[in-house]
Image (cartoon, grey):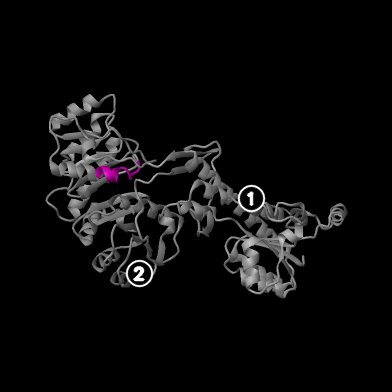
Amino acid sequence: MRIKRALLSVSDKAGLVELGRALAGYGIELVSTGGTAAALREAGLEVRDVADLTGFPEMMDGRVKTLHPKVHGGLLAVRDDPAHVAAMEAHAIAPIDLVVVNLYPFEATVMRGASRDEIIENIDIGGPGMVRSAAKNHAFVTIVTDPADYGALLGELSARGGATSLAFRKAMAAKAFAATASYDSMISQWFAFADQQQLFPDMLAINGKAPVILRYGENPHQQAALYTPAGPHGTGIAQARQLQGKELSYNNLSDADAALELCAEFRGGDPAVVIVKHANPCGVAQAASLIEAWEAALQCDSVSAFGGIVCVNTKLDGPTAEAIASIFTEVVIAPSVSEEARAVFARKKNLRLLVTGDLPDPRRGGLTVKPITGGLLVQTRDNGTISAADLKVVTDRAPSEQELKDCLFAWIVARHVKSNAIVYAKDGATAGIGAGQMNRRDSSRIAATKAAEAAEKYDWAQSRTVGSAVASDAFFPFADGLLAAAEAGATAVIQPGGSIRDDEVIEAANKAGLAMVFTGMRHFRH
C-alpha cells in the first residue's frame, strides 16, 4: 500500500522532525494537530491542520479534535469495497494511509505526583481511537506508535518505493493494540489502587513490556521470556544492569530475585552476604566487613554454595570478589562494584555480574500473582515485620541480649526460606538451614546435619548450632521439632505460636532450658 497521506500526533517528539522530513521527501501529505504541527512547521515543513481536514476547529481545550468522521472514515474505510468508496466520495472523506501516534504521558504524570485533575487530563481519548481504527484496518493503513519503529518504517518506504508491506502493517497493528491495552491497564490500575483504594478490583489488568527472550525456561524443553511492568514499578532484579557474563537464564533470574529480596532486608545495615541455591538461602551473614560476612555465609553450607547466586548489600570490594571467584558462582549481585572487583570478575567470563544501584524496599507494598490452572492467585506482598518489642516471652527463661539478636536474625532469614523452614543462627550468621520439607522435625534435623558437616569440614570443636537461636517460619505443631533443635544445641527459639499444642511445646522448651519467644506472625513461603 503506497502512502499518500499521513496523520501525525505525538506526545513524544523524539525523532519527529526527521520522520516528517523523510515522509515529505516521498511526497506524502502531512496532517497534524496542536504541538506536533507546530514542531513540524518550526522545522520548515508544510503541514495541514486536522481542523482543515475535518472542517471543525479543535475545541474543549483540545479534548475534541480528531474524533470526527473525516478522520475515522479516512482510517476505517475498506479501500476495495465499492460501498465504502462511495461513502467516502459522498461525504468528501479523504483516505489516511499512515498514522503516527503516541499517547498522552499518563504514566509520567502519575509518577511526578500530579494532581488528580491533571492526571485525568492526561488520559488520552482521541489518540487510542485513531490507533485502534488504523490497526483494525491494517490491510490498508499503516500504524506506528513507538518512535523506536520510525527507522523500520523508513526502511519499508525505502525498500518499497514509498509503500509498506502487509507483513509490516500486521506487525505494527499487533504492537499498536498492545500499546493501547497497556495504556488502558495503567489507567485502570490507577483508578482502582491509587484513586479508589481498591485492593482487589473487579477486573485486574496485568501487563508487561519489552520482552527479553530467554534461552529456555526451567528446563530446556520449555520456552521463556522476561517482561517488565508497564507503568510505575519498583526497582528489582529485572531492572539490574548486567556488566558481564553469559545471558541470564530463567532459573538465574528466579534465584537472583530470591537473593536480592533477602539481601534487601539488610539494606543500610552492616555488610551482609546472601548465598542462594534453587531459590533457597544456603548461607547468610552480617559482619564488620564484607569479606568476613562472605566467609561466615559460605561456612554455613559450602557444598550448596557451589554454582549458587551471591548478593551483597554494599559496594563489592576486591578482596571479597577474589574470595567469591574462588568457587564456581553463577551470578553476583551488588548495589555497586569497585574497579578492583570488576577486574577480578573479568577473569571469569561466564560469571554474570549485576549492579542494582540500590536495594528494593523490603517493606514496600504491592501484589504478587501466581498462576494456577484456570485462574490467578493474587495476594498482598509478605511485607510484615516484627521487632524485639513485638515478641512475647513464653518460657520461664527469657533470651539473653545475644540470643535475642540471633533470634531476630534467624527470623529474617526464615521468612525467605521455603516452608517448612528452620534456620539456626549464631553471632549474625546462619549455622544451618532446613528448607522445603513436609514436616518441621525433618527440617530441624537437616539443618543440624548441615551444620555438623560444616564443623567437620572446617575442623571446629563443635557445630555452630551449639548455643544458637532457631527460627521456625510457622508454629511447631508438636514438640518433636523443637526437641530436635534442642538436641542440635540451640538455646533460644523464635516462632509464631498459635498451635493448639503450644502448652506442650512450651513445657518441652522449659524442660530443655530453652528461651522461647512468639512473634504472632508466620511467614509461609511456598
Task: Examine the rendering and report whether any part of residue 316 can be seen.
Answer: yes
Q: Amino acid at mark 1?
A: Ile
Instruction: Say which residue label 2 marks.
Output: 348
Q: Does residue 250 appear to the left or right of 364 in the view shown?
A: right
Asked whether, in this view, residue 182 is left or right of residue 416, the answer is: right
- The CA distance from mark 2 to mark 1 is 52 Å
Q: At x 36% / y 53%, what residue is drawn?
A: 360
Task: Identify the magenta region.
Answer: 410-418
- Residue 387 sits in which quadrant? top left
Q: Where is residue 215? Give x, y as percent.
A: 50, 60
Instruction: Let me know if residue 229 appears in the view.
Output: no
Residue 287 numbered mark, or none:
none
Examine the rendered structure and indicate whether residue 37 appears above or below residue 296.
below
Q: Nearer the viewer, residue 75 or 121?
A: 121
How many numbered dots are placed on residues in this image?
Answer: 2
Location of mark 1 (residue): 125
- Classify the position of the N terminus by image quarter: bottom right
Q: Residue at point 13% right, 48% down?
A: 462
* Residue drawn 66% across the image and 68% down it: 153
Residue 190: % across, % down = 51, 45
Return the x and y of residue 173 as percentages of the image width and height. Answer: 67, 57
Asked if the magenta segment contains residue 411, the reply would be yes
